[in-house]
C-alpha cells in the first residue's frame, strides 16, 4: 500500500495558481527536485494529503525561464528552492528566504548539470545504439516481398563503382534478394544417436547420468518425430 | 533601552551533533528571529548515480547518515523495487521491519541521551547510550555492522536470520524494556528536566501543518504524518498500529513522543518475530528499468517522513536519484519555534527537532 502516487505535467505559468489551490485544499509541500535533461531542467514538486502523494512536473526550464517561488505559501520549501538555484542554476524568483547562491558551498557552479566522463560516455554510446536501431528500422522493408531488390535497383546501386567492387556488391545484393524472397526456415533439430548420448553421460555420477540420459533420449525422440513430419 | 544583536549559533557548538548555523537576532535575552543556514557538509552524493549503478548505489545511500543508515538503504531499495516492478518475498519484508524498528529505537535512545546531555544531566546521557549499545550489539550479531549495516539489497535482504538469532533479538528487546522504563520515568517526571522542557518552543497544530512538519516534531503538535499508518510492506501485517501523538506542542511533548515510540517499536519487533513467515529473503534482480520510468516512495524514518525519487534512462545507472529527508522540511518549523524564546533555550529547541544535517545536505 503506502501513498497513492501520481505524476502529472504542469506548465510553469500555472505553477502559482496550482500551489494556491493546493494550499487552500489542505495539501502540504513535500519537496522540490530538479533533473537535468537535454531540453533543460525538469522540476518535480511533490505535495501530500492523507493517503495521496501528487507529483507535478515542470518540463524544460532554461536559464531564461523565471520560476515563481512557492515559499510564500510553503515556507518549508526554502531548502529545496535554494538547492535548485545553487546546484542546477534554476532562476527562482521571489523567494522569502534567498541565500543568493550561497546555500551550498561547492567548488563548481551548477555541479548537477555537469556530466561525469563515464556518464557522458554511456550517454553517447546509448545515443549511437538508438540511432543505429532507428536507422535499421527505417531501412527495413515495408512491402510483402520482404524487401527483395529488383535487378534494376541492384544495377542502380552498383552504377559508378569500380568493376570488381560492383561485381561483389551485385552478387551480395542478389543473394540477399533471393533470401528475402523466401520465408525463413527454422533448421530441423538433429536427433542424437544412442552412442552420442552415452558419450555425453560418461563420467558423470550415476544419478546425474540417468537424468541426463532420460532428457537426451526424450529430446532425440522429439527431434526424429519432427524430421519425419 | 533594548538593543538588537545578532548572535551566531554554530556551525560548531557543543550541543550540535552536526554543523548547522543560525543567525539569532536577539533583543536582550529574547530571540526575535532565527535564520538557519546549512551547506557545511554537502557531499554531492546524489550525483554519484552517474558513476555507480543501482545495485552499487545502495551502499552510498546508507552512508548518507550514520544514524539513519538502515532507513536510507531501505527507502532506496523500495524505490528501485517500485521502479523495476519487483515484489520481494514476505520474509524479507518482516526482516526489514524488524531491523528498521531497531534502528528507530537506537536513534531515539541516542537522541534522549543527547537531550539529557544538553540540559546537563550527564548520568542520564550515559545510561541512555549504554542501553543503546545493546541494540548496536544486536546489529553487530545479525548483520556484522554496528552503524552501517549493509543488510538490504534491491530484491530483499543480504542474509536470513535463523530462529536462534530472532530469539536473541527478542530477549534483548525484553531485557531493555524494564531498564528503559526507568529512564523514561525520569524524563517524564523529574521536575528539573520538566522545567527545561515544559512550554519551551511551542508550535501550534496549525503552524505545524502550515510548515509541513513531519515526524515526532509534528506528532508532538498533534499532526499525524506517520507513513507507517498507510500499511506499506511489513507494517501492513501488524495487528494494529496507532502513532504516538501529543497535544502539548512543546519540547516536552517532542521528548515524550520519542520516548514512547521506543516502547512501541519494541512491541512491533516482538510481534514481527512471533509472526514471521518462512521462505526466501531475496529474489535476483539484474535487469535495467525501462527508459523514462520514474518512481517515488515514502518511508517513516526516526525523524519523520523521508521521500525518495528515482528516474531511469534505460540503463543500470539511474538518471536521477533523490532523497528528501525529514530534517529538510522541519528546518522552517524550527526557525519558527525559536521566535520569542529565551537565548538559553535555543539549544533545547534546536535539539528537539532531532536535526540530522548530513541527511539534509547529502
Image (cartoon, coloured by chain):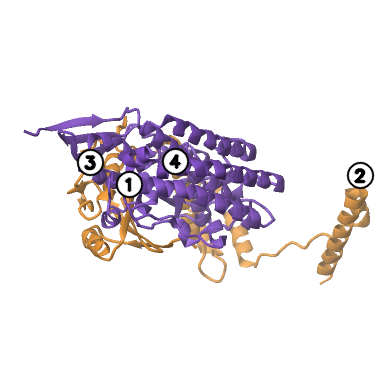
Chain colours: A orange, B purple
**Which label was assigned to residue B330?**
1
- Other-residue count near label 1 (Cα within 10 Å), few / some / many at <14 / 14–19 / ≥20: many
- Other-residue count near label 4 (Cα within 10 Å), few / some / many at <14 / 14–19 / ≥20: some
Report the Cα–Cα distance between label 2 and label 4: 74 Å
Report the Cα–Cα distance between label 2 and label 3: 84 Å
Tag 2 residue: A203
> Which is in the foreground here, disc 1 or disc 4?
4
SS at mark 1 in the image: helix
Q: Earlier in the sequence, mark 4 or mark 3?
A: 4
SS at mark 4 in the image: helix
> Which is in the foreground here, disc 4 or disc 3?
4
> Which is in the foreground here, disc 2 or disc 4?
4
Residue B70 is situated, as x and y percent measured from the top left of the image, at 52, 43
Tag 3 residue: B341
Determine the image quadrant of residue B27.
Answer: top left
Residue found 6% across the figure and 33% down from its top: B1
Most foreground residue, A161 or B129? B129
Most foreground residue, A80 or B177? B177
Chain ID of residue with mark 1: B
Chain ID of residue with mark 3: B
Tag 4 residue: B186
Amino acid at each position: 500500500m503506502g501513498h497513492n502516487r501520481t505524476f502529472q505535467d504542469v506548465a510553469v505559468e500555472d505553477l502559482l495558481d496550482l500551489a494556491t489551490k493546493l494550499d487552500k485544499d489542505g495539501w502540504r509541500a513535500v519537496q522540490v527536485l530538479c533533473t537535468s535533461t537535454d531540453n533543460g531542467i525538469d522540476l518535480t514538486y511533490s505535495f501530500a494529503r492523507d493517503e495521496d502523494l501528487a507529483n507535478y512536473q515542470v518540463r524544460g526550464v532554461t536559464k531564461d525561464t523565471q520560476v515563481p517561488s512557492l515559499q510564500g505559501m510553503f515556507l518549508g520549501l526554502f531548502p529545496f528552492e535554494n538547492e535548485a538555484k545553487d546546484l542546477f542554476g534554476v532562476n527562482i524568483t521571489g523567494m522569502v528566504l534567498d541565500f543568493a547562491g550561497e546555500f551550498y558551498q561547492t567548488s563548481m557552479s551548477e555541479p548537477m548539470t555537469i556530466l561525469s566522463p563515464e556518464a557522458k560516455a554511456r550517454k553517447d554510446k546509448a545515443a549511437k545504439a538508438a540511432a543505429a536501431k532507428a536507422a535499421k528500422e527505417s531501412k527495413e522493408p515495408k512491402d510483402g516481398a520482404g524487401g527483395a531488390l529488383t535487378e534494376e535497383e541492384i544495377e542502380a546501386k552498383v552504377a559508378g563503382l569500380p568493376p570488381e567492387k560492383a561485381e561483389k556488391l551485385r552478387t551480395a545484393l542478389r543473394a540477399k534478394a533471393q533470401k528475402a524472397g523466401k520465408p525463413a526456415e527454422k533448421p530441423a533439430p538433429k536427433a542424437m544417436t544412442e552412442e552420442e548420448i552415452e558419450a555425453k553421460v560418461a563420467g558423470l555420477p550415476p544419478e546425474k547420468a540417468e537424468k541426463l540420459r532420460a532428457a537426451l533420449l526424450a529430446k532425440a525422440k522429439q527431434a526424429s518425430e519432427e524430421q519425419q513430419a | 533601552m533594548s538593543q538588537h544583536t545578532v548572535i551566531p549559533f554554530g556551525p560548531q557548538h557543543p550541543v550540535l551533533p552536526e554543523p548547522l548555523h543560525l543567525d539569532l537576532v536577539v533583543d536582550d535575552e529574547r530571540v526575535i528571529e532565527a535564520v538557519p543556514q546549512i551547506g557545511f557538509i554537502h557531499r554531492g552524493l546524489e550525483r554519484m548515480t552517474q558513476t555507480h549503478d543501482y545495485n552499487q548505489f545502495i551502499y552510498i545511500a546508507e552512508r548518507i547518515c550514520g544514524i539513519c543508515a538502515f532507513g536510507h538503504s531501505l527507502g532506496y531499495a523500495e524505490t528501485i523495487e517500485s521502479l523495476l516492478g519487483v515484489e520481494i518475498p514476505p520474509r524479507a519484508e518482516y526482516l526489514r521491519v524488524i531491523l528498521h524498528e531497531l534502528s528507530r529505537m537506537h536513534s531515539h535512545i541516542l537522541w534522549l541521551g543527547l537531550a539529557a546531555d544538553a540540559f546537563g544531566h550527564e548520568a542520564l546521557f550515559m545510561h541512555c547510550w549504554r542501553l543503546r549499545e545493546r541494540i548496536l550489539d544486536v546489529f553487530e550479531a545479525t548483520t556484522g555492522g554496528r552503524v552501517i549495516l549493509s543488510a538490504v539489497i534491491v530484491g530483499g535482504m543480504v542474509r536470513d536470520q535463523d530462529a536462534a538469532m530472532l530469539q536473541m533479538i527478542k530477549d534483548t528487546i525484553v531485557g531493555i524494556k524494564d531498564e528503559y522504563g526507568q529512564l523514561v520515568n525520569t524524563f517524564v517526571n523529574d521536575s528539573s528536566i520538566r522545567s527545561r522542557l515544559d512550554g519551551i518552543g511551542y508550535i501550534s497544530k496549525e503552524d505545524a501543518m502550515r510548515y509541513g512538519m513531519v515526524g515526532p516534531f509534528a506528532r508532538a503538535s498533534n499532526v499525524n504524518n506517520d507513513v507507517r499508518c498507510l500499511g506499506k510492506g511489513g507494517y501492513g501485517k501488524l495487528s494494529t498500529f496507532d502513532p504516538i501523538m501529543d497535544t502539548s506542542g512543546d519540547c516536552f511533548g517532542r521528548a515524550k513522543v520519542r520516548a514512547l515510540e521506543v516502547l512501541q517499536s519494541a512491541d512491533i519487533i516482538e510481534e514481527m518475530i512471533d509472526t514471521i513467515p518462512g521462505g526466501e529473503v531475496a529474489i535476483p534482480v539484474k535487469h535495467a528499468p525501462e527508459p523514462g520510468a520514474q518512481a517515488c516512495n515514502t518511508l517513516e524514518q526516526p525523524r519523520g517522513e523521508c521521500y525518495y525519487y528515482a528516474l531511469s534512462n534505460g540503463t543500470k545507472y539511474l538518471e536521477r536519484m533523490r532523497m528528501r529527508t525529514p530534517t529538510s522540511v522541519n528546518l522552517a518549523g524550527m526557525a519558527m519555534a525559536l521566535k520569542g524564546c529565551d537565548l538559553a533555550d535555543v539549544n533545547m529547541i534546536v535539539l528537539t527537532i532531532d536535526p540530522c544535517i548530513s541527511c539534509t545536505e547529502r
